[in-house]
Amino acid sequence: MATRQSAVASPLSKRGRRALSPAMATSGSGQFKSAGPVWGPRKYILAATTVTLAVSAVAVATTVILSPARIAFSVTGASSSQGVEGASLVALNFTLEAANPSRRAGVEYSSVTARLQLYSASHAAAGWLKTDVHQAMPLQQPPATSRSLRASVLFDCKDLGCCGRAPPMTVLVLAQVRFKVGLAYSRQYDVQVSCQPVDFFAATAAAARVVCVA
């Protein structure tokens, strides 16, 4: 006599199958293994905020390190000369001193120019003389050092109505520089300073130091 066997439904049968937890996975042997923690929106926001703050801190530190250093300009050794007595051609000479007082930042000059401003009473206007700065560029200046740049100009005093003895002239210095800390360079800066009037014809001009200010 055949016996009847009752069919017992398996908990993983087609109808009674339960969904696996998303944090669980099966290996090749059929054993369950953890698939690691699942990140929620809060964790993603926290991670993104942390990365943003870290990048901002690096940017701020770099800006502080490569911030412009102060360059002190001055004019020394001013003199004048005239080739022939009574001639109208006049040569003016001076030295432009550039001091870098910073102990951490060096300076790289890509260009340095100097102009002389003379007020001509006969023309009731200001005249400009562009000088020649006798220095090859670019020029490197280590921290806490000074550089001396010779400059001169040859002009016809009749053009400015200042033959005989020209009045003191204002020196305007224009420079394009970058600052260097270690191997890092800053962006390029335009530096402009104006020096106090220089009397190129005075007997004491060569020994005087004229300070320039921004």
Image (spheres, rainbow, N blue to C red):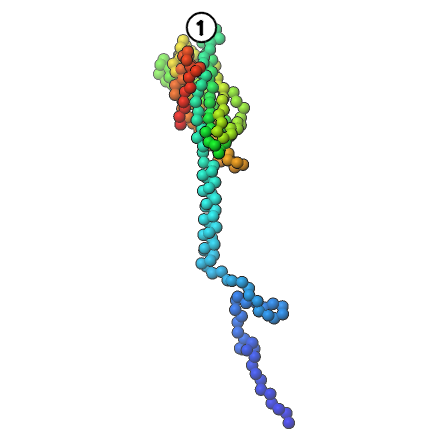
Q: Residue furthest right?
A: 1
Q: Position of residue 193 (x, y in %)?
A: 41, 26
Q: Nearer the viewer, residue 209 or 3?
A: 209
Residue at (49, 19) in percent of width and height = 150
Residue at (46, 7) in percent of width and height = 87
Residue 180 visible in image:
yes
Q: Quadrant of the N terminus?
A: bottom right
Q: Is residue 127 left or right of residue 183?
A: left
Give the residue pinned by disc 1: 86
Q: Secondary structure at mark 1?
A: loop
Q: Position of residue 64 (x, y in %)?
A: 45, 39
Residue at (52, 20) in percent of width and height = 134
Res 197 quadrant in image: top left
Res 34 quadrant in image: bottom right
Figure disc tally: 1
Q: Is residue 142 left or right of residue 193?
A: right
Q: Residues within 10 Å of mark 1 (few under 14, many from 20)?
A: few
- Check the image and report above or below for 154 versus 69: above
Q: Amino acid at mark 1?
A: Gly
Q: Quadrant of the C terminus?
A: top left
Q: Residue furthest bottom?
A: 1
Q: Position of residue 194 (x, y in %)?
A: 40, 24
Residue at (44, 19) in percent of width and height = 76
Residue 14 visible in image:
no
Q: Position of residue 14 (x, y in %)?
A: 56, 77
